[in-house]
Amino acid sequence: MGVPIGDLLPRTKIQIEQIDSVAIDAFNAIYQFLSIIRQRDGTPLMDNAGRVTSHLSGLFYRTAYIIEAGVKPVYVFDGEPPEWKKETVLKRKETREHATREWAQARAEGRADAFKYAQASARLDEQILDSSKILLRHLGIPIVNAASEGEAQAAYMTSKGDVSFTASQDIDALLFGTPRLVRNLTLTGRRKLPGKNAYVSISPELFELDFILSSLEINREQLIEMSILVGTDYNKGVKGIGPKKALRMIKSFNIQRALDDLGERLDYAPIKQFFLDPVVTHEYDLTWAPVNEEELVSFLCDEHDFSRERVENTVQRIASARDEAAQQSLAQWL
């Protein structure tokens, strides 16, 4: 879910062609595909063996689109979450289980809200994660297995300059120190507003950490402190404190004084320190390999019943895009 302060942060539009390389929060992207790519009654896409394939469809075709635009993607997978995130993980599990029950009832009754509950029931399991990694390896896309949080690892790689951008829907990556965060990179077209019969256009947005801090007239530690007051994946927010009020308080005095004035007790120090100095791995390989067309087609078409013609056409477009990028790089070098 991430930190709910996004509406307060300035951002600009960015064209996908302006992105050269990007570390993508894999769990975040896969959840999106599992939630969105479904039939009208909320049933996910499946192969003939009954295995969910919504994530493979989204991952394959959206990654192909990104590559065709000249972007080099890296997918970063979560590792072990910090101890104090267990409560959030448990609550999310309970929410999914409730949504699954509601979806079954709504679908049986033919209700219009079945899709909403189906989206909320989306969950990752080992089969989904393993098949996602197999697909990416066949595409020649680098995979990084984070030591802990994927956003933290992606932020670290971006801050080092190994990639130019971090991509996630969650604002957390900014708290972890990424200099540039792109949202909506793995989304496209129109998106239905929750609970409304209305749609909004989706396009990539760029959040630049230095510009945000300058605009809000705070530093990164204060950004983290205001987020802790509002609530993060690692702590409940203070009741009645929204982003604007949290910003005013943090600009006036530090988080401890804010908590004292509010009569609240919160062990915020380890959470703040985790954002400032997260657990990351320094060992990863960002080598982009050629597409293994034979294995890719076999995996998607023979194992998971994808359209062979559509997959082969997409593979050819990816190959052409990579050839063009390689020729441009060679021309610049010469």
Image: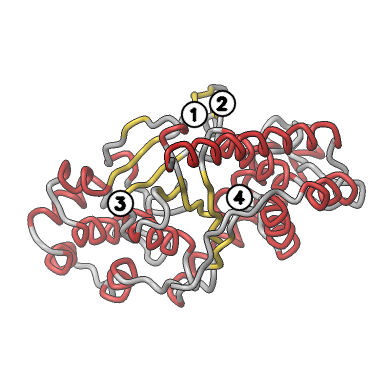
> Gap between marks 3 and 2, in whole Å?
26 Å
Work out whether residue 255 or residue 222 is closer to the camera in this orientation and state it. 222
**In this figure, which residue is indicated by the disc labeled 4?**
31
Q: Mark 3 packing: few (<14 Cα in 10 Å), some, or many (20+)? A: many
**In this figure, which residue is indicated by the disc labeled 3?**
179
In this rendering, the answer to whether 79 lies above or below 162 is below
Give yes or no for contact between labels 4 and 3 (Cβ–Cβ under 8 Å).
no
Label 3 residue SS: loop
Q: Mark 1 packing: few (<14 Cα in 10 Å), some, or many (20+)? A: some
Q: Mark 4 packing: few (<14 Cα in 10 Å), some, or many (20+)? A: some
Label 1 residue SS: loop
**In this figure, which residue is indicated by the disc labeled 1?**
202
Give residue 115's position: percent from left, percent from top: 68, 37
> Gap between marks 2 and 4, in whole Å?
18 Å
Residue beneath the point at 16% across and 56% down? 219
Give yes or no for contact between labels 2 and 1 (Cβ–Cβ under 8 Å).
yes
**In this figure, which residue is indicated by the disc labeled 2?**
189
> Gap between marks 3 and 1, in whole Å?
22 Å
Q: Quadrant of the C terminus?
A: top left
Quarter residue 259 falls in? bottom left
Q: Earlier in the sequence, mark 2 or mark 4?
A: 4
Q: From the viewer's perspective, is the residue at label 3 or at label 1 nearer? A: 3
Give yes or no for contact between labels 3 and 1 (Cβ–Cβ under 8 Å).
no
